[in-house]
Structures are given as C-alpha cells and as structure tokens.
Amino acid sequence: MLYYILKRLAAGVITVWFIATATFIAMHSVPGDPLMNDKAVSAEIRKNLERKYGLDRPVHEQYFLFLGNMLKGDFGISFTQQNRKVNDIIRDHFPVSATLGVLAILIASTGGVLWGALTAIYRNRLPDIIIMFLVILGISVPSFVFAALGQLLLVNINKLVGYSLIPVAGWGTIWHMLMPSLVLGLGTMALLTRLMRSSMLEVVNEDYIKTARAKGLSPTRIFFRHQLRNAILPVVTVLGPQIAAITTGGFVVELVFAIPGLGRYFVQAVQQLDYTVIMGTTVFYGAFLVFMVIVVDILYGFIDPRVRLQ
C-alpha cells in the first residue's frame, strides 16, 4: 500500500509540473500585453513594472523563476490588483468556492445514488422513464441556463410570498447557497444517476446476488449489503474528479449569482490578461484535481476488499 501511494504521489507531482509548464507556455503565447491598461505609462514606469514582475528577463529565466516560486508556494503578485498576492486571492476566495462545491456535491451524490437506484428498481416503467428524461435534460442543458431559470423561479417565489424568502444573488447565509449549489450539482447528479443505474442493472444478475437470494436474505438486506455497495464503485471512481471539478469549476454559477468565489477572479484574470493569477489558479486547480484522484484510488481499496492496490 505504501509503495502504491508513493508511486501515485510521484505521478501526481509530474502531472502538476506538466500543467504548470503547459500553462506557462500558453500564457506567453497569447497575444496581448499584460501591462497595458486604460492609462498610458511612460517608458520608465513600464521598465520598473517589467523589473517588478520579472518580464524583463528571458523567457527561460522566467520559467525557472516561476517553477522555483511555485515550489515555495509563491505564485507572485497580481498584475491588475494593486499589491495583492495570488496566494491571498486563493486563500480569501477558495473557501467560498469550496463551500459551494461541497454543498453541490452532497446534493449531486445523494440524488445520483438515490435516483439511479430507483430507476434500476423500476426499470422500463414510468418512474424510470421520467427520471431518465430529466437526466438527459440535466446533462445536455448548460449550467448558465439552469442558473437563469433558478433566479427566475426565486423571483416569482419571492413575489408570491410578498418578501425576499430566498435571496436571488449574493453570499453570506445558507439561504444564499441553496439555489447556486443545486444548479451547480445538477449536471453531476444527472451523470451519477445514469452511471448508478447502469451499475445497478449489472450487479443485479451477479452470482453473489443469486446466492444471497437462495440463502433467504431479505430484499432490503440484499439491496443495501450487496447490490448498493458493489454498484456504487463506479460512482466513487468518478466522484473524485467530479468533486474537484464542482469545487473549483463553478465559474459561471458564481458570476450569475454574484458569489465572491475563486472562479469569479479567474474569469476576470483571463479577461485582463493577469498572467500570475491565471497561472497560479490553474496550477492550484490542477493540483487539487490530482490530489482528489489519488484519494479516490486509495479509498477504492477500502470500499472493495477485492481490489489490491499493490
């Protein structure tokens, strides 16, 4: 087990290095000038800015400087936000994105397992048909459409009751989190529902299920002890990357609902060519995703004793 964990960690470090390198190359290939803004600057001021951000050095020196600072956990200073470090942006705003992501993944995983199991039990019957139709909608409709519909629904609800029952936008209370987390988790819930249904239908015909029935075990015990436990393995496999994707990828939802999360600053950095913020947040997102995949690989062995990680 220890050897496997070390090997996966080494592979994760290489992956993060590749992400950092690819991001650095992409940022220096994009046309535009990160130091250009609405105010004209003199040549002397521009030279001082280039010296401050290391842009006066050759590209290969900038690359090794970036890697060295990254190893020390320093992603530099934002080009557009005065005297604000990228580390501070991540520290201040990632908890907001993480809170929203955790709520979304709880809704998605609970709903996905529940609806997936329900569709497998009522296969080719009315509940299965209705849920699978909704699953297709959840997978095919973009999140910004659900976000707009969600806000419209909240406006009508608040108008109906005569006061602001649930806030339409903003951040601060659990009521602000309900609709954004639901919208953010809908796509993942649909994916997990479809995956859970397929897995349940495969497990139901396995020999150990037939043996359990032959022994006279109750349907409830067979369902929870044998069917659900084995059918949930594929769901756990994709849950790690989905957790990372939801926790760090709610860019559109954060913008629509005016949530001060990290995704909002990432979008602004792309629009303003803020190199340090783009590279810092991309590497952070990549490292978080790699970490979650490694955690899922390790948990796999505890969930299914048949899996031998060695």
Image (spheres, rainbow, N blue to C red):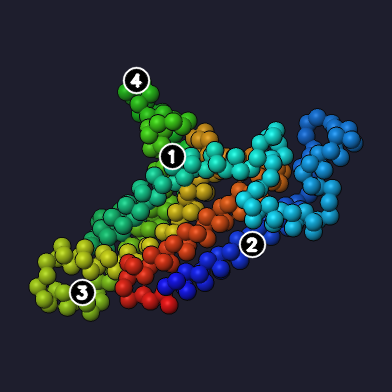
Labelled pair 3, 1 in contact (Cβ < 8 Å): no
Q: Earlier in the sequence, mark 4 or mark 3?
A: 4
Image-quadrant location for residue 92: top right
Disc 2 to disc 3, C-alpha distance: 45 Å
- What residue did someone put label 3 on? 209
- What residue did someone put label 4 on? 162
The residue most toward the left is 216
- What residue did someone put label 1 on? 180
Q: Earlier in the sequence, mark 1 or mark 4?
A: 4
Looking at the rendered structure, the secondary structure element under dot 2 is helix
Disc 4 to disc 3, C-alpha distance: 54 Å
Between disc 2 and disc 4, the foreground one is: 2
Q: Earlier in the sequence, mark 3 or mark 1?
A: 1
Q: Residue at x 29, y 69 (%)?
A: 230
What quarter of the picture does the N terminus occupy? bottom left
Residue 207 in percent (x, y) is at 23, 79
Along the line of sight, which residue is nearer the eye, 83 or 107? 83
Q: What amino acid is found at the position of numbered circle 4 in the picture?
A: Gly
Residue 35 in percent (x, y) is at 79, 39
Q: Is residue 257 visible?
A: yes
Q: What amino acid is found at the position of numbered circle 3 in the picture?
A: Ile
Disc 1 to disc 4, C-alpha distance: 22 Å
Between disc 4 and disc 3, the foreground one is: 3
What quarter of the picture does the C terminus occupy? bottom left
Looking at the rendered structure, the secondary structure element under dot 3 is helix
- What residue did someone put label 2 on? 17
Looking at the rendered structure, the secondary structure element under dot 1 is helix
Horizontally, is 253 left or right of 181 in the view? right
